[in-house]
């Protein structure tokens, strides 16, 4: 016989795991409060292992977030143990045995997910690791249930056992519908936020030909199957290109890696460097290589390079402003420098 206190402790571990899974699900869909809460634990930006794991391609299974699957798992097992606590000893033993089997299976899945984080994503989600620990706690307190052989069969022989198992099955189906519905609602909200950034696309309006004006050369109106005027074709092509650009921007917004790359490419140049060999008459000397801030506006950046130091057979100083590679020669002999800018 399994002590009820063991079931209660396992129920608390499952409740904590469910809360963490719900938080990770909200963070996966970019809910601001959840993102802020996760950032407090995991860090922000590149330092956030939780963010890296949540936005990786391993965060979903056939389009369903792993966090949603975890939420359903914890909610369903929690319901089973909660119902068992108000039933007889046979139902408690059966619920504990079923929960132990499920948690052992969950630990096997956790081992796979841990390997993915270590070797595929190269980042660790602290909150995910905490759910693994909670699963291990549940296994530890319910381990005694392994001795309760035939517990489910005995529970089915009692009225309260049948009620508990039936209630668990029906409740799990309701939880499945609730979690799936919540997941779709969060996905819809995320899409709405992305659309508000890009601007909602205008509804497609079928093109209608303006009424033909009679003229001496063509007194009869154009036939319905006649080709579109050149202006109408140009407008349709521009509308198609605009829709394609909006689709690409939508893909960038949906993919954090593409979004970071987009900002990196559109960001201003922040430094530039001088590279070169400065030759004086009858001697050879090299310049120093340094970096200075760039100024300008996107997409062109004008970079200032101080390019001459003291050298044999001549002294001088000069500056070059460039938006790309450039070569200079000046003052008391040949001095050649290649000035390059980088983001």
Image (cartoon, rainbow, N blue to C red):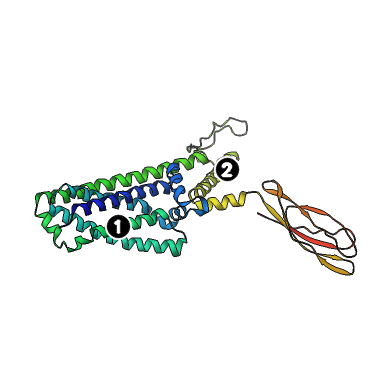
Residue marked by disc 2: 238
Q: Quadrant of residue 115?
A: bottom left
Relative side of 180 to 173, left or right: right
- Front-most of 332 and 36? 36
Residue marked by disc 1: 137
Kindly state the secondary structure of the residue where label 2 is placed.
Answer: helix
Relative side of 125 to 177, left or right: right
Which residue lies at the image location 47% right of the left edge and 41% below the top edge?
193
Q: Nearer the viewer, mark 1 or mark 2?
A: 1
Q: Taking 243 as reference, is 97 above or below it?
A: below
User: Which badge, 1 or 2, is on the more N-terminal residue?
Assistant: 1
* Alpha carbon distance from label 1 to label 2: 61 Å
Q: Taking 280 as reference, is 158 above or below it?
A: above
Near mark 2 (Cα within 10 A), the count class, few <14, some 14-19 or many ≥20, is: few
- Quarter of the image with the C terminus in it: bottom right
Query: Where does residue 39 sit, x and y in percent of width and height?
Result: 46, 48
Kindly state the secondary structure of the residue where label 1 is placed.
Answer: helix
């Amino acid at each position: 016989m399994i002590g009820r206190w063991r079931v209660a402790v396992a129920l608390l571990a499952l409740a904590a795991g469910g809360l963490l899974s719900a938080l990770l699900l909200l963070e996966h869909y970019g809910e601001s409060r959840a993102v802020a809460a996760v950032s407090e634990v995991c860090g922000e930006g590149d330092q956030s292992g939780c963010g890296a794991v949540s936005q990786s391609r391993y965060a979903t299974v056939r389009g369903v977030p792993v966090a949603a699957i975890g939420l359903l798992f914890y909610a369903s097992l929690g319901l089973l143990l909660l119902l068992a606590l108000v039933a007889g000893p046979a139902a408690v033993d059966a619920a504990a045995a079923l929960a132990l089997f499920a948690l052992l299976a969950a630990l096997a899945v956790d081992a796979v997910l841990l390997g993915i984080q270590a070797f595929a994503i190269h980042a660790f989600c602290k909150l995910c690791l905490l759910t693994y620990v909670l699963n291990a706690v549940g296994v530890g307190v319910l381990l005694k249930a392994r001795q309760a052989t035939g517990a489910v069969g005995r529970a089915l022989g009692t009225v309260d056992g049948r009620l508990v198992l039936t209630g668990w099955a029906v409740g799990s189906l309701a939880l499945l519908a609730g979690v799936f519905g919540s997941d779709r609602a969060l996905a819809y909200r995320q899409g709405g936020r992305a659309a508000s950034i890009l601007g909602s696309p205008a509804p497609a309006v079928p093109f209608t030909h303006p009424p033909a004006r009679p003229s001496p050369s063509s007194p009869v109106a154009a036939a319905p199957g006649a080709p579109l005027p050149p202006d109408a074709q140009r407008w349709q092509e521009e509308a198609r290109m605009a829709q394609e650009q909006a689709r690409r921007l939508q893909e960038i917004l949906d993919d954090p890696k593409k979004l970071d790359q987009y900002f990196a490419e559109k960001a201003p140049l922040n430094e530039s460097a001088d590279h070169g060999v400065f030759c004086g008459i009858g001697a050879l000397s090299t310049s120093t290589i340094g970096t200075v801030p760039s100024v300008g506006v996107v997409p062109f950046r004008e970079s200032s390079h101080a390019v001459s130091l003291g050298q044999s057979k001549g002294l001088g100083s000069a500056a070059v402003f460039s938006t790309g590679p450039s070569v200079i020669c000046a003052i008391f002999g040949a001095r050649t420098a290649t000035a390059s800018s980088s983001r």
